[in-house]
Image (spheres, rainbow, N blue to C red):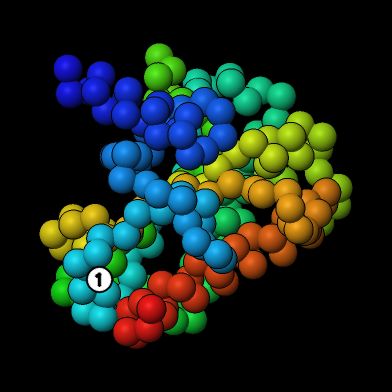
Amino acid sequence: MLAVTLLFLAACVSRRLGPSGDFSGFLDDYSLLRRGGPNDVALVYRDPEAPWTAYDKVLFEPVTLWRSGRHSLDAVPEGDLLRLVTDLEAAVRRRLGAGFPLVEEPGAGVMRIRLAITEARASDPVLDVLRARGGGEVTRGEGPLDPETHRFLESARIEGEIRDARTDRLLAAGVDWRRREGALPVDSWAEVDRALDLWAERVCARLEARTRGAR
């Protein structure tokens, strides 16, 4: 009954706040999410009592891609999906490392950050999680995107959460997607990487500001 209730809540929140379809299930509780403000992610939750200034280190988990079964994205080259996961992880890790020590173990003052690219629905009977470190050849170069990869980018989301690495307390969560108004083009890999760098800069700068006491 609890599982059914959570799936129902996720679907309701999606219909009210996000694009069509329900969420992937990467996050535990989508009912917490509310629309983000200017320069924020599209949907966001932040613990109003979180002691942000107590955190000064980050445990950053490998980025994953969630899809509805292994064959649900067959039209998109597998190397392109691996490239997206790899490039998002690299962009965020690079930007996080400029502001926080990156650690491998939980401890005092450590935030655990999880991110995923999602194109799945929690109500699907099968979910498949793609990991860049699980093997497979990654697409190289900076040339034009495959048309199916371009279509995938227009509908995919980035979901993420920040927790206290020692107590597992949820500090923040969010869902973001590509908004076309004023967005930079993403017709080539060079443009995708530039967009990921800008996204990482925006999100990590806000995190830095909070942990340093700014609002």
Q: Residue at x 46, y 51 (%)?
A: 35
Q: Which of these two is toward me, 31 or 194?
A: 31
The residue drawn where x is 82% and y is 34% is 147
- Position of the N terminus, as image quadrant, is top left
Q: Is residue 181 left or right of residue 34?
A: right
> Where, by quadrant of the figure, is residue 111 drawn?
bottom left
Q: In this picture, is 103 found above or below 86?
A: below
For disc 1, the marked residue is 110
| Up/down of 214 relative to 172, above or below | below
Three-letter residue code for mark 1 = Val
User: What x and y, as percent, mark residue 177?
Assistant: 59, 47
Q: Is residue 4 above or below residue 149?
A: above
Q: Nearer the viewer, residue 171 or 68?
A: 171
What is the x, y in percent for residue 156? 60, 39
Which quadrant holds the C terminus?
bottom left
Q: Residue at x 66, y 23 (%)?
A: 74
Q: Position of residue 3 (x, y in %)?
A: 23, 23
